[in-house]
Amino acid sequence: RAAGDFAEKIVINHETEELSKVRPDLASQIKQVSLESDMLGYDVLSYNADGSEKHIEVKAVKSKPGLTFRFYISENEVLIAQKNPNYHLYIVFDYTSPTPLIYRMPNPFANEILGVTIMPIKYLVTVKIKK
């Protein structure tokens, strides 16, 4: 949980910085909703430039980005993602370093994306990035 919390703060800082450039009025409204409830199915509430909500699920990966990586996701998170048009998945690689990388992944649960395998264990997701 500590790793996830740390990665969520990285994403909040990133989103705040980006949104401040186009919508400073919304940048201050970004929040870490995972602290309030696990049932929402996402961790961070942010906004797009048009003012629409962005529901961000954050996954922390300790290693640097590679061609393959894995993360766990709960059944509730998958069910929410399948129905949520505002869902975004951010993978924070190398989150303990001074320069972590945030990979914004298209919603792998909304439809089939090549290179993504979902196994219902607790849900283990494997992603292969094409070079």
Image (tube, helix red, strand yellow):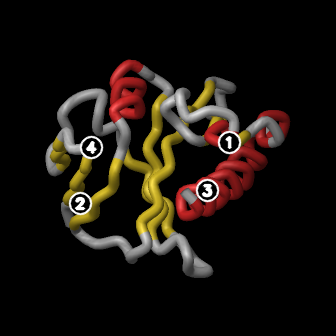
User: Cβ–Cβ below 8 Å for labels 4 and 3?
Assistant: no
Q: Which residue is mark 4?
A: 123
Q: Which residue is mark 3?
A: 5
* Screen quadrant of the N terminus: bottom right
Calculate the distance from the C-alpha at mark 2 to the C-alpha at mark 1: 31 Å
| Mark 2 crowdedness (10 Å alpha carbons): few <14, some 14-19, many ≥20 | few
Dot placed on the residue nearer the N-terminal end, 2 or 1: 1
Closer to us: mark 2 or mark 1?
1
Calculate the distance from the C-alpha at mark 2 to the C-alpha at mark 4: 19 Å
Residue 64 vs residue 74, the one in the foreground = 74
65 left or right, relative to 111: right
**Rendered residue at 28%/59% (across/down):** 70
Three-letter code, disc 4: Tyr
**Where residue 59 sits: x, y (%)?**
45, 54
Three-letter code, disc 2: Ile
Q: Which residue is mark 1?
A: 35
**Rendered residue at 22%/54% (across/down):** 126
